[in-house]
């Protein structure tokens, strides 16, 4: 019921936002929006051969872990990754500008420099110099830092913060991504972990939440682990705070040589493939998920269906390509594996454990 309520609230909010925007504020949006993850803008008189591309996103409740662990130097990577990985679904795109919004309470202001160092780290992973023929170097704009003591809440009074960012790039009109077609292969690029999605669930189901001082939120924690509990070669907290992998350089390099479509596996897991259109996406050989996902499934008693509907399950980005190009592409990205194929039909079908699980819509 909680999942349904969350999705309905989100759907209602999106519908209200769309209804509030007049058509004249969309007149320069490209008529053919080839990616559902990034927005394309056209102005032929100014950019005759290129389209501008933009994406915007935030980190979400992964920020709670950064605050609880007092580790602020990687969360900026996540902020960059969330918009960068959406943008690079376009393939041969050259990101050139990133602007962030950082809202902080009084004591969190002291960590602003650490947070932005993470942003800088992330942006250095997005420079397509030497990959895209016509490119601009990556730039960071002025951004905005807001003192927002009365707006934010935190389990450590005065330490609350939020961060979001927007990335802008450009792409040549003759280098737009292909449309997925039956017979294409689906190549998964390995994730670094949960990335920046599903963290409310992860925190509440895995952690004891002894750091949470607010009664209205502390009761949501039902897990048995502390953040510093050992977990494989790290800790529970370390595995959860692992920065989101950024795919910009690898995917841009692939798109330079081959015609591809890209899918960022973010919220709603495998359902993201359905955003490519009315086709069937068969995942017949999914990657092995990282141990943190196996732990989550065991502790939360979640079904396989729910896990792949909620998390990336080790597959952070999908490249859709012609089967004839697959072998060459596999050698161009770390952890790239063919996990399935495209066929006529609709929905995404996970083939696992002798069962077929259908994911419809998004």
Image (tube, grey):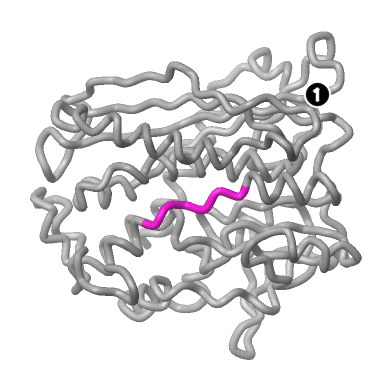
Q: Quadrant of the N terminus?
A: bottom left
Which residue is located at x 53 percent, y 68 percent?
Answer: 314
Report the predominant secondary structure element of the magenta stretch.
loop
Q: Please determine whether, in this image, residue 288 is positioned above or below residue 62.
A: below
Q: Please determine whether, in this image, residue 154 is positioned above or below residue 337.
A: above
Q: Secondary structure at mark 1?
A: strand
Q: Please determine whether, in this image, residue 91 is positioned above or below residue 306.
A: above
Q: Is residue 243 magenta?
A: yes
Q: Dot 1: within a 10 Å radius of its alpha carbon, few (fewer than 14), some, or many (20 or more) residues? A: some
Region of the chain picked out in magenta, as a range: 242-247
Point out residue 151 in the picture as x, y percentages from the top left corner: 22, 27
Which residue is located at x 71 percent, y 29 percent?
Answer: 40
Which residue is the site of mark 1? 50
Q: Please determine whether, in this image, residue 63 is positioned above or below residue 298.
A: above
Point out residue 152 in the picture as x, y percentages from the top left corner: 21, 32
Give whichever of 106, 72 is nearer the camera: 72
Point out residue 120 in the picture as x, y percentages from the top left corner: 45, 34
């Amino acid at each position: 019921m909680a999942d349904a309520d969350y999705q309905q609230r989100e759907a209602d909010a999106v519908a209200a936002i769309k209804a509030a925007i007049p058509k004249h504020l969309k007149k320069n949006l490209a008529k053919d929006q080839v990616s559902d993850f990034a927005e394309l803008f056209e102005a032929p008189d100014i950019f005759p051969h290129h389209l501008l591309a933009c994406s915007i996103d935030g980190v979400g409740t992964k920020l709670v872990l950064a605050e609880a662990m007092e580790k602020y130097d990687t969360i900026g990577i996540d902020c960059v990754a969330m918009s960068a990985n959406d943008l690079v679904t376009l393939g041969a795109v050259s990101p050139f500008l990133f602007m962030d919004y950082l809202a902080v309470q009084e004591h969190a202001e002291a960590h602003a420099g650490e947070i932005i160092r993470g942003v800088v780290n992330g942006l250095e992973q997005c420079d397509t110099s030497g990959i895209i023929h016509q490119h601009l170097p990556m730039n960071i704009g002025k951004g905005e830092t807001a003192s927002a003591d009365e707006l934010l809440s935190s389990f450590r009074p005065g330490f609350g913060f939020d961060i979001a960012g927007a990335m802008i790039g450009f792409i040549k009109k003759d280098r737009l991504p292909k449309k997925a077609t039956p017979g294409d292969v689906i190549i998964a690029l390995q994730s670094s972990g949960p990335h920046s999605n599903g963290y409310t669930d992860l925190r509440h189901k895995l952690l004891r939440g002894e750091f949470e001082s607010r009664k209205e939120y502390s009761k949501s924690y039902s897990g048995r682990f502390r953040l510093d509990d050992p977990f494989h070669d790290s800790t529970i907290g370390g595995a959860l705070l692992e920065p989101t992998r950024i795919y910009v350089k690898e995917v841009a390099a692939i798109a330079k040589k081959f015609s591809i479509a890209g899918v960022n596996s973010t919220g709603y897991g495998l359902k993201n493939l359905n955003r490519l259109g009315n086709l069937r996406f068969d995942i017949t050989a999914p990657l092995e998920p990282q141990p943190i996902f196996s732990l989550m499934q065991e502790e939360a008693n979640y079904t396989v269906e729910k896990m792949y509907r909620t998390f990336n399950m080790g597959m952070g980005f999908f490249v859709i390509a012609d089967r004839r190009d697959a072998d060459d592409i596999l050698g161009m990205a770390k952890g790239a594996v063919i996990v399935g194929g495209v066929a006529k039909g609709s929905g995404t079908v996970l083939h696992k454990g002798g069962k077929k699980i259908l994911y419809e819509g998004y």
